[in-house]
Amino acid sequence: VVDGEIYSVRSGMTQPAALVRTTKDGKSSRLRAFSSSDGKFSAGPDGRIYWSEPVPDRRWSHRINSVIRSFDTSSGRTRSLSAAGRLSSPSVSVDGKTLTVTEYLDDGRSRVVIMDADNGDISRYISVPDSLQAVESILLRDSLYITAISSSGYGIYSIRCPESAAGWRTILA
């Protein structure tokens, strides 16, 4: 929800997935189509919506990367904020200045990428322990929280930022 208007993804048997705006009076308008969406959307306080979108490799059909994209609800402009990688589940900070994104590495590990929400510049990478596979993340005050999958199941973990010597804490497992 941005300024009282609902933004959602609509798809159907005869329509590809599309970002749709529904106004207060119930009227819907299609804003942009998607090849597909990879996970959740995150709306910032400035009216921008962020998501991860798969991008197939032009040469290798089984290689699929993903990029972080943003849609500005006031201008209607879509931008790519990242180069191709395996990026997923962007989450915008409360002030709208920072994104946390989960990155899946070729060796099977995952890490959290902290990037600027305006231009996609990466400020740091935060490694996740080998025993965890990060799913989603959020930066709150001076701590990073992630949901992750481990051999014991799904859990919530945190680390102080900048990274403390104490390392990751288990919140709920």
Image: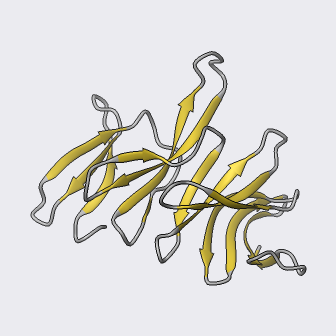
Looking at the image, what colour scheme do you see? secondary structure
Quarter of the rendering containing residue 172: bottom right
Number of numbered discs present? 0
Against 63, residue 95 (above or below) is below
| Image spot of residue 54 (x, y percent) | 54, 36
Residue occupying the point 31% across, 31% down: 13
The structure residue drawn at horizontal position 65% and vertical position 40%, both measured from the top left corner, is 85
Q: Residue at x 14, y 66 (%)?
A: 24
Near-viewer residue (65 or 151)? 65
Which sits in the foreground, 42 or 77?
77
Tell me residue 128's x, y (percent).
81, 61
- Is 150 on the left-hand or right-hand side of 142? right
Query: 112 or 115: nearer the eye?
Result: 115
Query: Where on the picture, by quarter, is residue 171?
Result: bottom right
Give the image quarter of residue 100: bottom right
* Residue 141 place in picture, x, y as percent: 61, 84
The reply, left or right, for residue 143 in relation to residue 75 is: right
Quadrant that contains the N terminus? bottom left
Q: Give the percent coordinates (x, y) of residue 142.
A: 67, 83
